[in-house]
Amino acid sequence: MHTTGEKYRNRIENRTTRVYFEQNGFINDQQWGKHIKAVISVERVTNMFNTKQKRYNTREENAIYLANHEITSGKAHKYIRNHWFIENKNHHVRDVTLREDYSRIRVKPENMSTLRSFALNILRKNKISNINKELYENSLSYNNLYSYQHFI
């Protein structure tokens, strides 16, 4: 079992990661049961401060992950956190800033996705922290594009 507590942005979040290893009758599925070596359970209890009501509201979640190898609870916690870091850093920016979910491109959408990735990589390589603001400023003046040191 691995437990962590974090406090940020009006949130107090406690996570408990537990790992259960294969036992007799652990997984009943004939096809996949032999591949599953561990079940990882992550329990999240989050207290979020509601500024209008001036009190904390509690939210509880349980997430279940499967592993094909034995793993410690500390490593499982680290891997799961790293996965969500990538999800928030990349996919959230694509969805919110570049509005990828609202795209109406239906013929070869992978071409536009490659261009979005190219743009994000250029901005990140130049250590731009606010992608949305930088895209807006570049839309007002295309000359800003020539000021990037790491363009290619």
Image: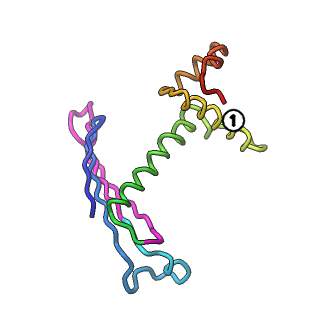
Q: Position of residue 110 (x, y in %)?
A: 72, 44
Q: Is residue 45 in the magenta section?
A: yes
Amino acid under disc 1: Leu
Q: Quadrant of the C terminus?
A: top right
Callout count: 1
Secondary element under disc 1, as helix, strand or loop, is helix
Q: Quadrant of the N terminus?
A: bottom left
Q: How is the image coloured?
A: rainbow
Q: Is residue 87 in the magenta section?
A: no
User: Residue sitting at 54 percent across and 42 percent down?
Assistant: 91
Estimate how packed mark 1 is, as few (under 14), some (14 to 19) or many (20 or more) residues with alpha carbons within 10 Å: few
* Residue 141 placement, left or right of 6: right
Which range is magenta? 41-69
Q: Which residue is mark 1?
A: 115
Figure quadrant of residue 3: bottom left
User: Residue sitting at 47 percent across and 27 percent down?
Assistant: 129
* Residue 115 placement, left or right of 83: right
Taking the view exactly as shown, the residue that stands out farthest to the bottom is 24
Q: Position of residue 104 (x, y in %)?
A: 71, 38
Q: Position of residue 25 (x, y in %)?
A: 40, 85
**As drawn, 6 above or below 142:** below
Taking the view exactly as shown, the residue that stands out farthest to the right is 107
* Residue 136 placement, left or right of 65: right
Figure quadrant of residue 16: bottom left
Q: Position of residue 134 (x, y in %)?
A: 55, 22
User: Residue sitting at 55 percent across and 27 percent down?
Assistant: 126
Majority secondary structure of magenta residues: strand
User: Residue sitting at 63 percent across and 31 percent down?
Assistant: 119
Q: Nearer the viewer, residue 50 or 4?
A: 4
